[in-house]
Amino acid sequence: MTGKIGFVADIEDTFDADAFDLEDDDDEPFVAPGSNVPPPGSPQTVQPAKKKGPSLKARAVDLLSRREHSEQEMRRKLARHAEDPAQIDPVIASLKKEGWLSAERFTQSLVHRRAPGRGMSRVVQELRQHGVDPDQIAEVKESLQATELDRARDVWERRYGTPPADANARAKQTRFLMSRGFSYDVIKRVLAGAGDAFDDE
C-alpha cells in the first residue's frame, strides 16, 4: 500500500498544472489550431473606415464647371448626396454669393443652346420647368419673338428645304415644326414658299 501512495506522490510532483491551464490571461477567446477564424485584433478583423466622398459644395462646383445650372436643378442633384435636406440651403447660398450659381447666366445659356432649333413656346416651357423668374422669361419671350420666323425658316430648310408637294407633305412638315415649338402662324408663313413670301415679316 505504501508503494502505491509513493507512486501517486511521484506523479503529483512531476505534474505541471500550468501546462493544462486553459484560461487566457488576456481573456481572449480560444481559437483552435488550424481554424480559419482570424485571431482577434488581427488585420483581417479590422474593418476599413468608409471613405467619405466629395462635399456637397465640391460636387456643385464640379457640376457648374461643366455647364450652367438652375437653382432647382442644382438642388435636385445635391439632394442625392445630402445626408440631411437642411444641408443644401447653406450650399446654395454660398454658391450664389461666390458667383458660381447665377439664374441670369443659366437663362442665357439655355436660350443659346435651345433657341436655334426650337420655337419660343418650347424654350419658355423649359425655362418655367427650371423655375426661372417670370420677369426673366418675359424678357426672353420678347427677344425670341423678334427672331421666331427666321429661326423657323432655318429649321425647316435644314430638314426639308422645298415646299410641300401635296396636302400630306404639308401636314407632315407642319407637325414637325409644331413639335419644335413654333406657332401655327409662323409655320404657315414658312410653308408659303420662298422668295418674297419670306420677306413679308
Image: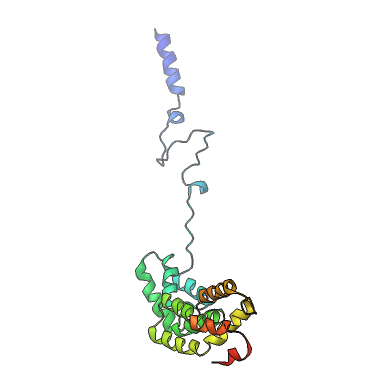
Instruction: State the residue lying farthest toward the top.
Output: 1
Q: Nearer the viewer, residue 29 or 123?
A: 123
Percent position of residue 107, x then y: 47, 82
Q: Nearer the viewer, residue 91 or 172?
A: 172
Percent position of residue 80, x then y: 43, 65
Q: Nearer the viewer, residue 86 or 185?
A: 185
State the quadrant of the N terminus: top left
Quick check: 173 left or right of 128?
right
Percent position of residue 189, x then y: 54, 85
Percent position of residue 83, x then y: 39, 64
Q: Nearer the viewer, residue 17 or 81?
A: 81
Q: Residue at left 48%, top 88%? A: 145
75 up-or-down from 35: above or below: below
Instruction: State the residue lying farthest toward the front.
Output: 166
143 up-or-down from 12: above or below: below
Q: Residue at left 50%, top 90%? A: 146
118 up-or-down from 43: above or below: below
Q: Residue at left 49%, top 54%? A: 48
